[in-house]
Amino acid sequence: MTRALRTALAVLAGAASAHADALPDARVFCEVTPCLQGTAHRRVLAKDETVGGARCKHGTEVGTDDAGHVMNCTLAGAQTLDALPAAADAYTLFHPNGRVYQTHLATPHEFAMPDGSTTSCDAEVVAVYDDGSLYWCELHAARGVARVHAAIMFYPGGKPMGLTLDAAGTLGALQVPAGTAVQWDASGTALGGELPSPITARGLSIRGEFTLLPSGQVGSVVLAAETTLAHTKFPAGAELQLRDDGSLERAKWISARGFMIHGEEWEDTTTASYDATGHTTSSYTTHYQSNVRPEKYKP
């Protein structure tokens, strides 16, 4: 959702509450990173108002916690918050200690990192930890193997959590192409990622999201092409979980699909487990049927 759309929705909410009446308590909306804990006491501002050091815009919603600390507001004009150049109309979240958690930058901004390096962020949404260190942004300038104008995330202390590779590289035991989004744990061990295009791994054509086992081999994958494994033919799109030795441990796939007499779509999804020899140890199927008819069948 764009800032303009969020602001428009907030203005409509304000119009419906001309006297700035309180709104029901609710969780705040978060854009790119895990959301704030707890619910916010919400109200719509009848005029621009300074709340917790931020100048918040009239006609938009402000949320505060039980102690009265600001949790979210939409900024009335560009302003500097915690040394960040925040943009006008930026929907902004705050940590319980009052520091900015998420906002939109008005101009590119450079963060100092714990190891003495810097990270330059685009004038887009940014998230920071409660000590002011960088959590998430889109890169404005080159940084190591990370692709510019793509998201980058850091753990507290500055170790990379996730980024998009600007060139082909190695992740665990896997060779991945440029454009692969990758993720590490806090110790630097590769966890997995998301592929921009299909590749072959352990003899399987895979696409999209994948995880890695502690050995570095792929564990969970999504098939990019029909494959027979463990005496079963799996379609493209099947989700497989492999053991370290490459044997199939679990699978989930659409096993049947079709349409009812009036065009409502239905599908069966099968989930099965396998032993190391490839024999099925459990299996069940769930059925889904849409209750929406195509336009040509509607009266």
Image (tube, rainbow, N blue to C red):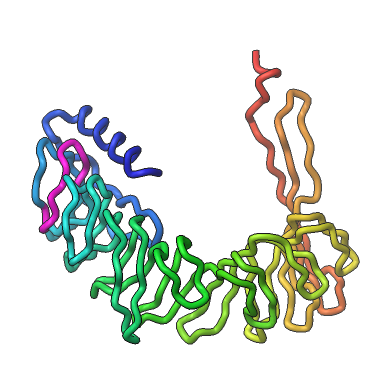
Decide if residue 39 is in sight here: no
82 over 226 or under it: above or below:
below
Displayed quadrant of residue 42: top left
Q: Is residue 109 magenta?
A: no
Residue at 74% over, 74% down: 242
Residue 217: image x %, image y %? 70, 80
Q: Is residue 113 or residue 161 the one in the foreground?
A: 113
Give the percent coordinates (x, y) of residue 67: 13, 60
Q: Give, as a single range, the part of the protein colored magenta.
A: 51-62
Which is more toward the observer, 229 or 278? 229
Task: Give the camera-side residue of 78 and 6.
Answer: 78
On the image, the x and y values in percent for residue 33 come to 39, 62
Task: Give left or right: position of 138 versus 205.
Answer: left
Res 197 visible: yes
Point out residue 41 in the picture as x, y percentages from the top left corner.
19, 49
In the image, 203: left or right of 96?
Answer: right
Q: In this view, does 172 lie above or below 293?
A: below
Residue drawn at point x = 14 percent, y = 39 percent = 45
Residue at the top extreme? 299
Front in this rendered view, residue 124 or 220: 124
When the figure is inspected, residue 184 is found, relative to residue 273, above or below; the finding is below
